[in-house]
Image: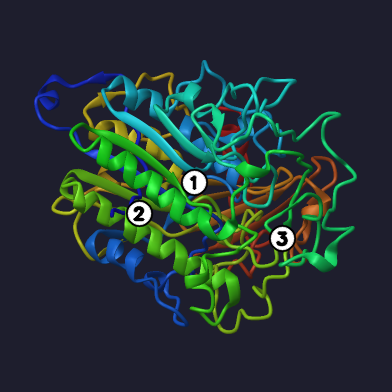
């Protein structure tokens, strides 16, 4: 079998000099809710992640690798469009019937690669919306406005997240194994609101909920949202990782003779964490740690699939995460009680939802045998938002100036070439309008909603409706010592810079 990962971006015009040779494959493996400290190659000591460690030892591990936002939908949106999510409505955490913030007119990474002759696929968690505006997805009549419309030749996806309905797979435009005699509904009058739920039948659940996540029950776990019908199509949480790995390997083997781009979007380690039985109990940290072991295994499967297909040396893998870690995210799965000495965000503050480093500084590894230096560590700043411009250059593709406006070509940094430069700045998007801006060693944090205020911040501008913080990451990587009062000029300069970035200047 094989194992996949990587972030790739290619575009419109293929260089004739490269066209005569086989262009490299690209596999982007994006984990879900994986923190900077959640891998042994990034400092975890209570368990080991040997398969992902092989990528690090055989490639380059970045210590300043970022995703663009601290939640999943906006990071995935930016990865495909090269556009900061705060520029587009509906890029928050989408509900079960959410419509995609991507439009069929948008330029996307898979569109660029497809025009360049690549076969393109997404396998795994989607959570970027399906269906028409004002209508949402029609699970029974063929789903419109989804991955196939945004540049993917093949799609085998989980429509939303593990914890949201419906708990089904979608292949192309159709729900897999859906019985026409038992139609599936997630909205409207056909949804049975009297069915057992996490509230009414809590004592029957295999995993209790801690907040929310108490509506429709599937596989003994209650979810966010209501769904009726489609019983034959429902997946079992324990089997999802293996199914996604098999689908990814199938795509690789079918397309081994031509260049391909695979976006493998793992559902691990998002809640509800219910790994396959063979991984349960493999770490001291409950199902959260066990799900990391399942993720690690899956990465190994994809890498082996590439080797079995004879294309490992022709494939660049990018391993990343869509945001930082979270412990209790709605279920009582032991993540808090069994944390022990493990530090999911490593030395950094915050995690999922947060504009601090722990929210967006995550594992980031590039791997390409014989091309990317092995066993090296890079401190260059790289971000998933740069893949739409960086990976096109890999295939000799020129991207239009108007495409991917917030993305930068940092291919040399991803390949760890001598003299390469990373990003000068990186924007870190939290929830409720919170933003962070890192420039060099300095980090500026700006809140727009009093509900999101940190307990240590002191400066709040009622006139602007913002609160500001300033940190020096070289001296204070954990962002504990707010220097806003000591360096007002620097803070003001960074505030002005962030304002210009948000305004698109």
- Kindly identify the residue that appears in the image at 70 percent across and 20 percent down: 133
Outermost top residue: 105
Q: Position of residue 422 (x, y in %)?
A: 35, 47
> For mark 2, does the 10 Å Cα neighbourhood hold few (<14), some (14 to 19), or many (20 or more) residues?
some
Residue 397: quarter of image: top left
Please name whichever residue, 112 or 503, is drawn nearer the observer in this view of the structure: 112
Badge 1 vs badge 3, beta-carbon distance below 8 Å:
no
* Residue 440 seen in the current view: no
Numbered disc 2: secondary structure: loop
In the displayed structure, 399 sits above or below 329; it is above
Numbered disc 1: secondary structure: strand
Q: Is residue 246 left or right of residue 95?
A: left
Please name whichever residue, 99 or 341, is drawn nearer the observer in this view of the structure: 99
Tag on residue 328? none
Q: Which residue is mark 3?
A: 220
- Tag in front: 3 or 2: 3
Q: Which residue is mark 1?
A: 426
């Amino acid at each position: 079998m094989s194992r996949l990962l990587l972030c790739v971006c290619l575009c419109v015009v293929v260089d004739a000099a490269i066209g005569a040779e086989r262009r490299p494959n690209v596999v982007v493996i994006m984990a879900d809710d994986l923190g900077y400290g959640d891998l042994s190659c990034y400092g975890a000591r209570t368990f080991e992640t040997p398969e992902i460690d092989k990528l690090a030892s055989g490639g380059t591990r970045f210590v300043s690798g970022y995703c663009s936002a601290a939640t999943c939908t906006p990071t995935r949106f930016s990865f495909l469009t090269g556009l900061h999510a705060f520029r587009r409505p509906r890029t928050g955490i989408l509900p079960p019937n959410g419509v995609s913030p991507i439009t069929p007119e948008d330029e996307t990474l898979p569109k660029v690669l497809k025009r360049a002759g690549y076969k393109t696929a997404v396998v795994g968690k989607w959570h970027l919306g399906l269906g028409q505006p004002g209508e949402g997805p029609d699970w029974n009549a063929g789903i419109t406005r989804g991955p196939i419309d945004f540049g993917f030749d093949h799609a085998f996806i989980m429509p939303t997240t593990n914890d949201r309905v419906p708990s089904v797979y979608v292949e192309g435009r159709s729900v897999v194994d859906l019985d026409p005699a038992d139609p599936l509904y997630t909205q409207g009058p056909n949804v049975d609101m009297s069915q057992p739920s996490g509230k009414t039948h809590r004592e029957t659940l295999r995993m209790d909920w801690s907040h929310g996540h108490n509506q429709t029950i599937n596989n003994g776990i209650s979810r966010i949202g209501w769904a009726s019908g489609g019983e034959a199509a429902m997946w079992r949480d324990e089997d999802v990782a293996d199914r996604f790995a098999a689908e990814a390997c199938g795509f690789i083997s079918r397309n081994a003779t031509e260049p391909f781009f695979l976006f493998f979007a793992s559902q691990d380690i998002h809640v509800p964490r219910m790994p396959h039985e063979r991984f349960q109990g493999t770490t001291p940290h409950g199902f959260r740690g066990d799900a990391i072991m399942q993720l690690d295994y899956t990465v190994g499967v994809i890498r082996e699939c590439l080797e079995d297909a004879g294309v490992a040396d022709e494939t660049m893998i990018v391993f990343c995460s869509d945001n930082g870690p979270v412990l209790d995210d709605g279920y009582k799965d032991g993540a808090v009680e069994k944390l022990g000495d493990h530090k999911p965000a490593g030395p950094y503050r915050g995690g999922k939802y947060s504009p601090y480093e722990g929210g967006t500084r995550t594992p980031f590894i590039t791997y390409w045998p014989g091309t990317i230096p092995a066993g090296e560590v890079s401190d260059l700043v790289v971000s998933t938002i740069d893949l739409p411009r960086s990976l096109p250059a890999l295939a000799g593709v020129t991207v239009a100036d108007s495409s991917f406006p917030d993305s930068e070509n940092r291919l040399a940094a991803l390949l760890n070439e001598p003299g390469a430069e990373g990003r000068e700045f990186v924007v870190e998007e939290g929830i409720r309008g919170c933003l962070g801006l890192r420039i060099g060693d300095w980090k500026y944090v700006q809140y727009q909603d009093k509900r999101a205020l940190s307990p240590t911040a002191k400066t709040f501008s009622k006139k602007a409706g913002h609160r500001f913080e300033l940190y020096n990451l070289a001296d204070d990587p954990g962002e504990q010592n707010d220097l806003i009062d000591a360096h007002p000029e620097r803070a003001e300069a960074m505030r002005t810079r962030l304002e210009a970035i948000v305004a698109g200047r």
